[in-house]
Image (tube, rainbow, N blue to C red):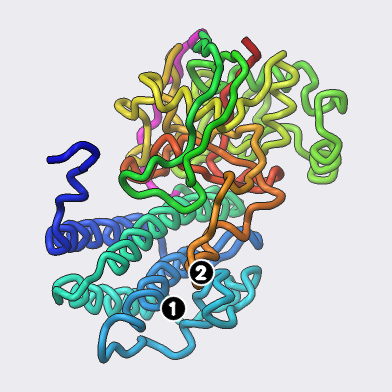
Amino acid sequence: MTRGTTMADLMTTAQRTDLLGSRFRDVRQTTEVLATPLTPEDQTVQSMPDVSPTKWHRAHTSWFFETFLLEPRLAGYRSFHPAFGYLFNSYYEGVGARYPRPRRGVVSRPGVAEVAKYRDHVDEAMAGLLTGGALTTADADLVELGLHHEQQHQELLLMDIKHVLSCNPMQPAYATVTVAEPSAQAPVHFIEHEGGLVDTGHGGEGFAFDNESPRHAVHLEPFALAGRAVTCGEWMAFMADGGYERPDLWLSDGWATSQSEGWDCPLYWFRVVDDWWLFTLGGPQLVDPSEPVCHVSYYEADAFARWSGGRLPTEAEWETVAAGSAGNVDGAKFLDTSVLHPRPTGSTESMFGDVWQWTSSAYSPYPGFQPAAGAVGEYNGKFMVNQYVLRGGCCVTSADHVRPTYRNFFPPSARWAFSGLRLAHDG
């Protein structure tokens, strides 16, 4: 092996195809496992414009493989239904018209059973493509992109159905989950960094989305980053001190949004006499002060940071710490279908898992960024405006889907994602 050569460089196309075939089956099966607890009625509901029905997620991820791989690459392939390209295209304007996103919930047909047949049709054809021996490197790259795309939709599926079920007065549980025993809130210590010139962004080995590149230098001033995420107990102290009632803590647009939406606590929290409860994928439960606060917007996170005397980290600060020993994913709390909720924290936690962490960085292109050619280039680049970056993955993120350079992004008012925060301060 020569200097700079990786195992991926030595892997033959056939070996990579075999690995992709196995991974394809695993990822596709995971989507079905996540949909299994839901009734057909559950899978059709759209509770707000940003939420998509479960059956839509299942169909759209199949549409991706059909549109970008099977139709252009597999000789003799016949699409499952001529209308599905319109119904299940999300935002790829380059491949044709699409059904309006806010109206996905009024499409009762195709039903869940037909969507399942669609998935089987695509899976069977993909098996042929993956065993046919004609997969090019570009094809393999598209398969890998499609699998990470499906993992993103697995997380969205759980985010969305949580919102759907929360709107039901019966507050039904998505699944039976393990609830941690309440524990004492752990203290927090800060990880010091001397600053200086650091390299951030994807370095070229392994999978990454296009928005993670190119790797580039960033100058950091000395800073410190909290060893764990902000907890529910700390958030309750913010609330008790009038955090939602003090305009001096809030950005102007955040204050206007908070007032118009009537925010006085994180999404899914509610008061029962003197106790705070929250709705989870396992149904209602008491708020545990020791677990990371979740379902807060960028506006709320920024207000809390200002109240605490700290700030939100930049994404370069977050990544620099995450790329070191503190960012080891061992022990991180990712997708576990028996939990599906942030777990209580210790004084020091992995940089990854439990909750996505808001940063103060606007979602914008790195220096030299160029989107991929064609419709696939619409994947990330065209959303680089009016959004903020989150890092680290969460309790509904697959463990093999995250890395230190991964950039998630949402509008600053978004709350239905599993989003929390980790504090920083100047060194």
Magenta segment, principal secondary structure?
Answer: loop
Residues 17 and 37: in front is 17
Number of residues whose C-alpha sits closer than 10 Å to that of mark 2, classed few (under 14), some (14–19) or many (20 or more): many
Could one spot residue 36 in this view of the protein?
Answer: no
Residues 213 and 263: in front is 213
Q: Secondary structure at mark 1?
A: loop
To which quarter of the image does residue 59 belong? Answer: bottom left
The amino acid type, in three-letter code, at marker 1 is Gly
The residue that label 2 is drawn on is: 44
x, y percent for residue 196: 55, 18
- State how far apart marks 2 and 1 are (Cα): 8 Å
Q: Secondary structure at mark 2?
A: helix
The amino acid type, in three-letter code, at marker 2 is Thr
Q: Is residue 31 left or right of residue 357?
A: left
Q: Which disc number belongs to residue 111? A: 1
x, y percent for residue 376: 47, 67
Residue 45 part of the magenta-drawn span:
no
The magenta-colored residue range is: 174-188
To which quarter of the image does residue 351 belong? Answer: top left
